[in-house]
Amino acid sequence: MIESSFIDVSSLSYTYMKGTPYETKALNRVDFTANKGEIVGIIGPTGCGKSTLIQHFNGLLRPESGKVIVDGLDLNVSEVNLRDLRKKVGLVFQYPEYQLFEETVAADIAFGPRQIGFAEDEIGIRVKESMSLMGLDPSMADRSPFSLSGGEMRRVAIAGVLAMKPKALVLDEPVAGLDPLTRKKMLDMIVNLNRKEKITVILVSHSMDEIVEIASKIVVMNEGMVIASGNAGEVFSNSKVIDSARLLLPQCTELMVRLSELGLPVRHDLYTIEACTDEISSLFK
Amino acid sequence: MIEVKNVTHWYARNTPEEVKAVSGVSFNIEPGEFVAMLGHNGSGKSTLSRMLNALIFPHEGTIKIDGLDSCDEANIYDIRSKVGMVFQNPDSQIVCSTVEEEIAFGPGNLGISREEIYKRIDEVLKMVNMEKFRASVPSKLSGGQKQKIAIASVLAMKPAYIILDEPTSMLDPYGRRQVLDALSFLNKSIGIAVILVTQHMQEAFEAGRIIVMHRGKLVYDGAPEKLFSDGKKLESLSLGMPASGLISESLRRKGVKIGGLYPKLEKLAEKIADLYNKGGAK
């Protein structure tokens, strides 16, 4: 187990504005593991510490107490090379399209690798590769990012992070504000990055339905603590966890609960549409 | 009544980057209606909704709010007090350091008396079920609570219409529910017309009527049930089914004869139970 973990957090605490009247404890002895090649979903109410936690993964925040180890790098050591770390872990903020600033799509995607000091021909290759990974047509390279649609702009922003060739991608609400079709395409692309490029994915989301469809492990946070972690069954079968973090069940699970309340002999420990409709249709066979 | 007649709006008009954001759109909204506005990213929803309270103006066509033409500068303040606007991110709209001051800000600017303002603060906090937070600091509230305060501050101007541009996209499921419940109460019990711009298909069912924008044009104006019964059309408009619709589709593919569309989970559950009890099962 230990050798396959990519991010290992133990007993991590973090306090904002420490020593002032506005002091807020954002993380309280958090344990978290993301294994290589996993898709981990982090859920929990607004203000529960999700964003504070993920900012530790690429060294934007440094551990106040507790341990953070990323791909063998110990982030507690003050001389840790942040440049190395940020090549390993790409962080995509909420609404990353607001961070686009260059004149062309290609220049924006090239910004990261250029800062690191790669040769121009290497940068050119990386820009092409990242665009193709995000399904952006090569003809877009010379366009202004601001002439693109919201979904395209977001893909350009993520392509800029992929151009650093990270081993792990951390995404904070990557589909918030996108229309349903664009949302679906974006989730498919994220799953593809994981399957084909073997990129470890950590995903923060408010949509239980989307999380259960793509994540292999779900971590629930509330009030700065991890209150549950495991597969969908382990997390959503615990009504205490659901109530205290004010989560909703995935809609298909909610349906199964209602059906069994109506007296139908169905399981309600099912979390994907496929599994739920299999169970329901078996009633009629 | 809000009357939108043949409205067109360009960005960067007469430049090489010219974009026609809204193109020849017409519709009316009656007082007391609840309308959801859907459409892909960049379809013109936000441009259109900003024209409804005179933040931006039609280049062609007219918009009238209770008879007031939005292109006549003399009407702008009257229009903005009739049509309230709530944006996606409450943090970009909240400016004061307590909830009470925040709500007093709008009416204070209109020169309304102190007694009347105090009365309105009580009223609007009650409407969004936030009475307990009168003295709170907005930045200490949750996302859903902040959004309800943003709504309350707009309500303090006593609008007849309130437009919300994706007000729940940054909220967690609980915050989202709180905001939707508040909107439903304002519409049903107070009679305020609600125009909800959203990317969440389930939210659209809160409305009696749906307007769909696609590439600047209005392409659907009607009941939610009709729109959501056509999966192919939805996809061509970059829209999707709410979860219950996806479940119904999957059931149909697996041979369960559930028939029509059940946007609400309760109804879908009842239908399945009904089929089962009628002996569809062996």
Image (tube, coloured by chain):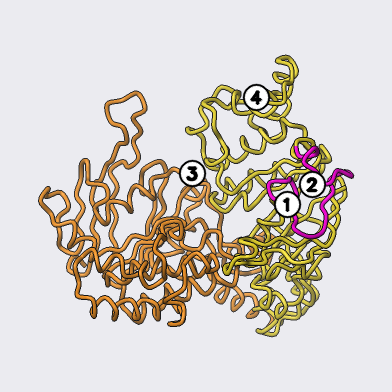
Judging from the image, mark 1 belongs to the subunit labelled B
The residue wearing badge 4 is B104
Chain to which mark 4 belongs: B
Look at the image and say whether residue B275 sits in the magenta stretch: no
Image side of residue A139 versus residue A249, left or right: left
Residue type marked 3: Ser
Chain of the residue where label 2 is placed in the rendered structure: B
Q: Quadrant of residue B249?
A: bottom right
Reading the image, the residue beneath label 3 is A244
> Looking at the image, which residue is at 86% across and 53% down?
B3
Instruction: Specify the amino acid type for callout 4.
Output: Ala
Image quadrant in which you'd find residue A203: bottom left
Which chain is the one coloured orange? A
Chain part drawn in magenta: B52-76
What chain is the yellow one?
Answer: B
Contact flag, marks 2 and 1 (Cβ < 8 Å): yes
